[in-house]
Image (tube, rainbow, N blue to C red):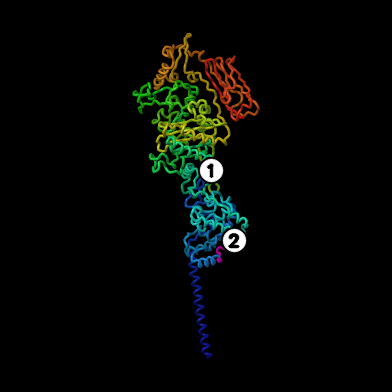
């Protein structure tokens, strides 16, 4: 080959090489340019990693019981999340996530190219995506800032963000952000929400097997859901996590084997709510105060007043009681409220027998169709007539006005519609005179007792004397007391009339329980509350329980009510065979029941000095129960069962005794036969109390005429001997009306404990005439009786052997005078 040809070839090759170099350089420059443009486009609008520290991540509001340990409910939006610190997350939770998601997490930077290549080859061989190559940092970038869609642009944006995150945060910070961010399924975002959702515990309490299982979920939360159909695959993946942890040296082989053998138990997949009626009431309060969106995203921690142990028992009692009533009396529903009288805190609240149950009868819709609707909260929403449970309010006002438990009224058929000439003064229940314009109430047992004192009329829930008591107390006074006691629903005075004391107005169970709490606390009413504390996610206290109370009754008045309602002997005539359901060993318990007309509502409200429990039984649609299902049959069994359980852990406290009420007026102190005297002649009088209180009352004749009729029928010679006109200068016959008979127990003190082998009981008895007898009862058994040479003042003493004492002991001293008047004083002591 000639030199010219060789030269030409060399020249040509140089030219081609130069040209190729130009193209290569041009291509590189073009690629760099377009790459730069692409980077700018990909990076466009990407958020700064710094905002991870300051952004407002949506967190659930959590409602707990009073211990702060039992999670009752989470209020959340689309994401159920609780942020916890890196230190609160157990080491094996972190290690499990690293082992299954990114085993070289602490070695590589934002991107692990080896993992990407390995995943690419594996996916290429299998023909589908079986392995990912994303690092934990990439996954955080995707979950925190990007959509889950699989596109090249999204992947490139993910890489850019991951690189920025690695520059901004340490590995531990990235891992913490990741574990608090990623979805685990069932709306649970972050490890704490996942632990609570699937295992009902905090992340800090997870064991190794549980940690491994949770680490297995984020790859495909729906597919691997413990509540789905791929649980076997989930368990296989959980074991694979443990294998990797062993391989990486995080755990030993023994720990791995042990964890793989553990049989995991998942929380029930339910609505995830405990004490639903209580919780929903709390939720409504929070939303009204703070706003719906704030509650769902602000991560509040709400500690309620609920006693979870008592709540569970209350739900059991209400459900079983309603089922029993359904079978026996066609009463489908029940409700229960328990309140700490000393604080106003609601300890248990059941709004219906079963929140989640289908309405009854099957197929009914709402309202009048349904005897039972589970989601309706009778305790806080239901307006129900309380029957005789309203009576203590009228008696309390009467006691305020100077009447006493010994005051006598007549229990006789009485027409109270005094302004209606069409209503006869003499009531004949055998005739059809039940006009709506007339009002002559029956008694529950359909009998009338004649003269009865206020103690027995309240304790035995006798209707006619109670209506008279309401009249004497004054309707406006009683309605004012009801309002002061927290009853907000009695606002239509003209609609109730004197039937108010028989339950003529509607009330809410929760408010009625709150009203009775004032009796329990000697007239002091604490504001009813269901929340102890609300904190935001940073721990700032937004609200905290403070005891707020008001003196709504004089202590003496409340003590008189307590003394009557806790008098087992006085209530015995009403309860008869069910009396044992009203007595609790070692505890003094006051009780009032209520039954409305036609047995639509049955109530039991009872209390100790520290605890008030109210029960309602009936039907949501106000249909009456059947077979005379009054309070004693339908409500008392539930009330007794719950209170018996609740009192097991409560200290024994007795009611403060009222001061002795000294009355000079005969009927006020218990004498209904009043003897007037002039010049040695006696003029005995028998009248109803209005004769001595207000003869100008429009009710006077309506009350007085039945008394005269009763006297004619029941007292021989009544017309010739009684109610003769009394001369103006006559006075009450002193021999027939001696001074007040009183008993004062000096030792022991009420509520004290006996610390020796014997107990000295001492008392003083005073009387205006000679004392005829003194009796001592220990736990209702007569142990001493004295009848000789007692005089008008007697200092009594008796020594009781300690062997005769029980854990709780009722000591009662009864005294009689020559007029056969009787007085007694009771105390309780403990051994």
**Eye-nearest disc, 1 or 2:** 1
* Residue neighbourhood size for the residue with mark 2, other residues' Cα within 10 Å, grouped as few (<14), some (14–19), many (≥20): few
Q: Earlier in the sequence, mark 1 or mark 2?
A: 1
Residue 151 shown left or right of residue 761 in the figure? left
Quick check: can you spot residue 56? Answer: no
What kind of element bears circle 2?
Answer: loop
* SS at circle 1: loop
With respect to residue 291, does 117 lie above or below?
Answer: below
CB under 8 Å between callouts 1 and 2? Answer: no
Vertical arrangement, residue 137 with respect to residue 567, above or below: below
* Labels in figure, total: 2
**Which residue matches tag 2?**
106
Residue 822 is covered by the magenta coloring: no
Q: Position of residue 101 (x, y in %)?
A: 55, 60
In this view, 262 is above or below 556 = below
Quarter of the view holding residue 628: top left
Quarter of the C terminus within the rendering: top right
The Cα atoms of the two marked residues, 1 and 2, are separated by 41 Å
User: Hey, which residue is sitting farthest left in the picture?
Assistant: 422
Range drawn in magenta: 106-114
Residue 796 percent location from the top left of the image: 61, 19
Residue nearer the viewer, 238 or 80 = 238
Residue indicated by mark 1: 65
Relative placement, left or right, of 248 versus 465 is right
Kindly indicate the quadrant of the structure image that contains residue 790.
top right
Q: Choose top left, top right, bottom left or bottom right for residue 382.
A: top left
Q: Is residue 477 among the parts visible in the rendering?
A: yes
């Amino acid at each position: 080959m000639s030199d010219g040809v060789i030269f030409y070839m060399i020249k040509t090759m140089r030219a081609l090489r130069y040209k190729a170099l130009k193209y290569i350089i041009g291509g590189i420059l073009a690629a760099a340019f377009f790459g730069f443009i692409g980077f700018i486009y990909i990076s466009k609008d990407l958020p700064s990693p710094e905002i991870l520290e300051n952004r407002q991540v949506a967190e659930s509001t959590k409602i707990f019981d009073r211990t702060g340990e039992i999670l009752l409910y989470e209020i959340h939006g689309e994401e159920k999340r609780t942020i916890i610190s890196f230190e609160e997350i157990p080491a094996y939770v972190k290690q499990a996530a690293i082992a299954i998601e990114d085993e070289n997490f602490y070695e590589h930077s934002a991107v692990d190219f080896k993992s990407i290549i390995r995943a690419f080859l594996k996916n290429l061989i299998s023909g589908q995506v079986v392995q990912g190559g994303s690092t934990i940092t990439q996954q955080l970038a995707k979950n925190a800032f990007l959509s889950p869609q699989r596109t090249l642009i999204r992947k490139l944006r993910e890489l850019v963000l991951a690189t920025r995150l690695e520059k901004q945060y340490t590995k531990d910070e990235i891992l913490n952000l990741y574990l608090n961010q990623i979805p685990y399924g069932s709306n649970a975002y972050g490890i704490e929400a996942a632990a609570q959702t699937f295992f009902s515990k905090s992340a800090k309490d997870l064991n190794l097997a549980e940690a491994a299982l949770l680490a297995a979920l984020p790859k495909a939360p729906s597919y691997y859901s413990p509540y789905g159909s791929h649980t076997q695959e989930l368990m296989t993946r959980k074991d694979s996590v443990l294998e990797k942890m062993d391989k990486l040296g995080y755990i030993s082989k023994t720990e791995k084997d042990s964890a793989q053998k553990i049989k995991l138990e998942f929380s029930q997949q339910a609505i995830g709510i405990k004490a639903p009626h209580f919780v929903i009431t709390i939720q409504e309060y929070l939303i009204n105060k703070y706003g719906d969106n704030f509650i769902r995203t602000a991560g509040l921690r709400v500690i309620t007043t609920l006693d979870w142990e008592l709540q569970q028992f209350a739900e059991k009692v209400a459900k079983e009681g309603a089922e029993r009533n359904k079978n026996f009396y066609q009463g489908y529903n029940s409700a229960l409220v328990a309140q700490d009288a000393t604080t106003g805190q609601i300890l248990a609240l059941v709004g219906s027998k079963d929140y989640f149950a289908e309405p009854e009868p099957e197929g009914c819709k709402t309202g009048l169709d349904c005897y039972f609707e589970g989601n309706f909260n009778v305790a806080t929403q239901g307006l129900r007539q309380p029957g005789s449970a309203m009576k203590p309010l009228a008696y309390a006002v009467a006691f305020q006005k100077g009447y006493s438990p010994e005051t006598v009224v007549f229990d006789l058929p009485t027409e109270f519609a005094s302004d209606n000439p069409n209503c006869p003064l003499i009531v004949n229940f055998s005739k059809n005179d039940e006009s709506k314009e007339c009002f002559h109430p029956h008694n529950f047992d359909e009998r009338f007792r004649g003269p009865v004192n206020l103690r027995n009329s309240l304790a035995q829930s006798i209707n006619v004397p109670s209506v008279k008591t309401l009249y004497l107390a004054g309707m406006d006074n009683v309605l004012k007391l009801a309002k002061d006691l927290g009853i907000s629903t009695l606002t239509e005075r003209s609609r109730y009339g004197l039937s108010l004391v028989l339950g003529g107005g509607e009330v809410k169970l929760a408010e009625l329980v709150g009203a009775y709490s004032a009796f329990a606390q000697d007239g002091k009413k604490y504001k009813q509350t269901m929340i102890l504390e609300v904190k935001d996610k940073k721990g700032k206290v937004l609200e905290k329980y403070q005891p707020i109370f008001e003196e709504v009754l004089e202590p003496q008045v409340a003590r008189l009510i307590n003394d009557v309602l806790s008098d087992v002997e006085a209530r015995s005539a009403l309860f008869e065979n069910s009396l044992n359901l009203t007595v609790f060993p070692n505890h003094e318990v006051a009780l009032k029941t209520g039954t409305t007309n036609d047995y639509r509502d049955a109530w039991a409200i009872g209390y100790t000095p520290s605890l008030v429990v109210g029960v309602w039984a009936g039907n949501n649609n106000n249909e009456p129960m059947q077979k005379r299902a009054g309070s004693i049959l339908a409500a008392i069994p539930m009330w007794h069962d719950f209170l018996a359980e609740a009192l097991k852990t409560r200290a024994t406290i007795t009611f403060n005794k009222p001061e002795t009420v000294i009355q000079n007026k005969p009927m006020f102190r218990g004498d209904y036969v009043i003897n007037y005297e002039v010049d040695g002649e006696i003029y005995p009088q028998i009248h109803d109390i209005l004769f001595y209180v207000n003869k100008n009352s429009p009710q006077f004749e309506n009350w007085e005429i039945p008394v005269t009729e009763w006297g004619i029928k029941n007292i021989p010679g009544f017309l010739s001997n009684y109610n003769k006109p009394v001369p103006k200068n006559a006075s009450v016959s002193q021999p027939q009306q001696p001074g007040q008979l009183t008993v004062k127990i000096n030792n022991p003190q009420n509520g004290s404990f006996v610390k020796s082998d014997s107990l000295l009981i001492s008392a003083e008895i005073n009387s205006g005439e000679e004392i005829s007898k003194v009796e001592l009862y220990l736990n209702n058994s007569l142990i001493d009786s004295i009848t000789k040479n007692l005089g008008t003042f007697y200092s009594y003493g008796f020594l009781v052997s300690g062997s005769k004492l029980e854990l709780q002991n009722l000591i009662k001293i009864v005294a009689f005078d020559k007029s056969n008047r009787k007085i007694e004083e009771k105390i309780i002591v403990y051994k």
